[in-house]
Image: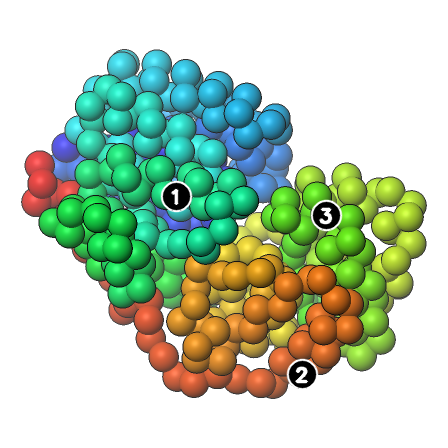
Amino acid sequence: MKILTIIGARPQFIKAAAVSYAFAQYENIQEVILHTGQHFDTNMSNVFFEELCIPKPIYNLGIGGSLHGAMTGAQLAGIEGVLLQEKPDWVMVYGDTNSTLAGALAAAKLHIPVAHVEAGLRSFNRRMPEEINRVVTDHISTALFAPTATAMQHLANEGIPLEHCHHVGDVMYDAALLFGARAKQQSTILQLLNLSAGKYILTTIHRAENTNDLQRLQNILKSLNEVSHTLPVIWPVHPRTQKLLEQPELNSLLGTQVQLIDPVGYLDMVMLEQHAAVIATDSGGVQKEAFFYQIPCVTLRDETEWIELVDAGWNQIVPPTDKSNITHALLAAVESFGSPIQPYGDGYTSSRIAKKLLACA
């Protein structure tokens, strides 16, 4: 069975690392990896393939860095050409990026079955490009691999036939188990940044709803500056956010205790997550990684797909519409731990996916 895996962004590299590892255990699975190029610089792409031992992509379309329509359209055309050449039995897509949507559309139009990993997630905010991508992908997929019971319920509510939906768990938990120990052995990021465990706040901000809204972004920056007088803030900055922060009127809002650093590799990011006092983020993946390492999280958004973490007290939703609310939430979250829960499976999700695809062959 030939599976063509389509990836393009940092979170997908992490998920694919776990699933590709599972695929490699089966002689009758041939995986061909296509990288769209959506994340293309070294710190956002190449380092993940090296650290996580992901098989080198056979194809790299080099398509990224443009508006949503132009990017998705170019990826759709490029993927279609590869599918016509490779003729895979399945196309596998991950998550909710433009690469996900383009891969699913290209496959569906060629009548190639689509497997969607991380199916059924919903924010119910159609202003988010990611929400559009994940909804459309789910409705044209043949095998939908849901990480949680809540995700399964969303699929049922939308009328997707349940025989196509599989509650398998979360591949990111697989990755956390696979690579968490390796991070402790190999990463030296804490020493390089002169950080002490539990004595800093880690933040990541990249979503358009925050970076494209000047008031929200200013509230985040002012709050990070305030809390940095209590605990220093470490911020690996997404390239798109970095361009905005180069503007003097924004950069001036950050004090010396907010340390901006380049994007880091997965092992260094895991190390930073494992030892933070609290994590502030608008990333879906980082919310879960915070939980995997039992670190309190403040999500700077209006909603989250991972509502079970909010219900259990591990995650707090704080819309960045008020600077004081953000500051209070971050300081209050330090050592504020949630209830013990295990919503994301047992670490064998990737193997379940491989077995289910083989059963469909």
Disc nearer the start of the sequence (2/3): 3
Q: Give the residue type at disc 1.
A: Arg
Q: Secondary structure at mark 2?
A: helix
Q: Which residue is mark 2?
A: 332
Return the residue nearer the eye: 180 or 186: 180
Give left or right: position of 86 versus 205: left
Q: CA distance from mark 2 to mark 3?
A: 26 Å
Q: Give the residue type at disc 2.
A: Ala
Residue 333 appears in the picture as rendered: yes
Badge number at residue 324: none
Q: CA distance from mark 1 to mark 3?
A: 23 Å
Q: Residues within 10 Å of mark 3 (few under 14, many from 20)?
A: few
Q: Position of residue 102 (x, y in %)?
A: 40, 28
Q: Residues within 10 Å of mark 2 (few under 14, many from 20)?
A: few
Residue at the image point whose x is 58% and y is 41% from the top: 44
Q: Which residue is mark 1?
A: 134
Q: Which residue is mark 3?
A: 213
Disc nearer the start of the sequence (1/3): 1
Q: CA distance from mark 2 to mark 1?
A: 33 Å
Q: Position of residue 30 (x, y in %)?
A: 21, 33
Q: Give the residue type at disc 3.
A: Asp
Q: Position of residue 135 (x, y in %)?
A: 36, 43
